[in-house]
Image (cartoon, coloured by chain):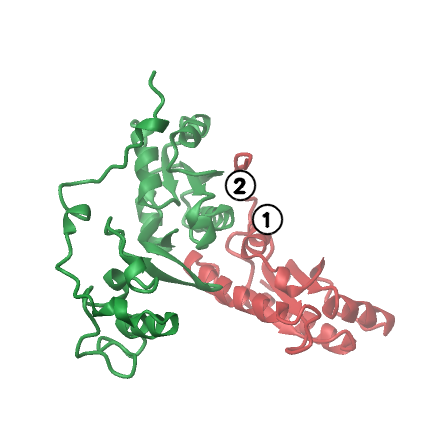
Chain colours: A green, B red
Amino acid sequence: MIIAEQKPMETIEEFIKDYKKVLFLGCAGCVTVCLAGGEKETDLLATSLRMKRELEGNPLETVTYTATRQCDPEYVDGIANYVEDVDCVVSLACGVGVQFVAEKYRNKIVFPALNTKFAGGTVEHGVWEERCGLCGDCILHKTGGICPIIRCSKSILNGPCGGSQDGVCEISKDVPCAWHLIVEHMKELGRLDMLMEVQPPKDWSTSRDGGPRKVVREDVKIDE
Amino acid sequence: MGDFEPKIVAFCCHYCAYSAADLAGSMRLQYSDNIRIVEMPCSGKTDQHVLLRAFEEGADGVYVAGCMEGDCHFLKGNFRGKKRVKQLKNILDQIGLGADRVEFYNLSAAMGPRFKEIADEFTERIRNLGPSPLNKSVKSSKGGDVA
């Protein structure tokens, strides 16, 4: 999922200081799971800011709603009645959701309440780790299901490097060496031979090259 | 400020503080009548938003009372409640209400006198802090229906 975390309250307050009625729009997708922008977080943020503004003598009227997903047009279309009624929108979705809402409701300014961090997962309750570099050319089958692109600090394809010490990366004692993990796992699988093959330089054209990427499935497209 | 009587909401765990309140009553202990008790199934049910709403609805102080550490009926609920109250203190500081208006206490069902002590102690604390700066009728808006 996409992992995000909330911006400081003061930042969000600064965004909306000139607005009287604000829609706080949560998202029931990834940001609910990573506890950054779900129904609870949306209500908490709206209430906190409402109280703060009340204390500052600049009352704020809040509307809260949590869309099923802000990255799907049909759910974004469904919030029209909330959006038309407010001065601006604070979206607690990832950057994708913010853009979909801003694109749909062009007459309303949309503020991001979150900083979108990375694609990752939950390693324990309250801890999320980056696991995918979204490079567009997955090689996890060659590396025992451990991504060297994002989990190796150098993103090297033929590791480990000289900075690997006792299974730890040289950048920090808290960062395990991805290539150490890969070697250990391949050993467990009995497939160390797979690591003997030298990997050529990566073709990055599937990644941040040539502007925004697009996936098209002709078979599921609905032609009007 | 001399005649200020604080409104306090006490969120009490069913297994300890709520029973301790019952015991305090049976023991005929006189404690501050400023507290309104809300029974919870466990202090682990603590929801920061609900506590915040209590302030918005006019409470001057809010506390959560859970079991002694290690005695939680649900094993870890009181630790979770405590962490959430700690985080709420940060939020209250940011809002400008002040962290001292919210607190977490540990006690057991057998501690009727301690329940009285907590009620009196917290009431005195809030009395010294004075009325919540929010304590006027706050017009809160209704959120949309969440699908």
The percent position of residue B16, horizontal first and vertical second, equals 74, 70
Under circle 2, the secondary element is loop
Above or below, A139 against A96 in this view is below
The percent position of residue A198, horizontal first and vertical second, equals 16, 66
Chain of the residue under the numbered disc 1 shown in the image? B
Badge number at residue B26 = none
Residue assigned mark 1: B57
Residue B11 shows in this picture: yes
Nearest the eye: A62 or B121: A62
Which residue is farthest top? A224
Q: Is residue A98 left or right of residue B118?
A: left
Residue A63 shows in this picture: no
- Quarter of the image with the C terminus of chain B in it: top right
Above or below, A100 against A162 in this view is above
Say whether disc 2 or disc 1 marks the residue closer to the N-terminus: 1
Q: Is residue A182 left or right of residue B27?
A: left
Nearest the eye: B38 or A145: A145
Q: Amino acid at mark 2?
A: Ser
Location of residue A88 (image quadrant)? top left
How many dots with numbers? 2
The percent position of residue A10, horizontal first and vertical second, equals 34, 54
Q: CA distance from mark 2 to mark 1?
A: 9 Å
Residue assigned mark 2: B140
Q: Are marks 2 and 1 in contact (CB under 8 Å)?
A: yes
Q: Amino acid at mark 1?
A: Glu
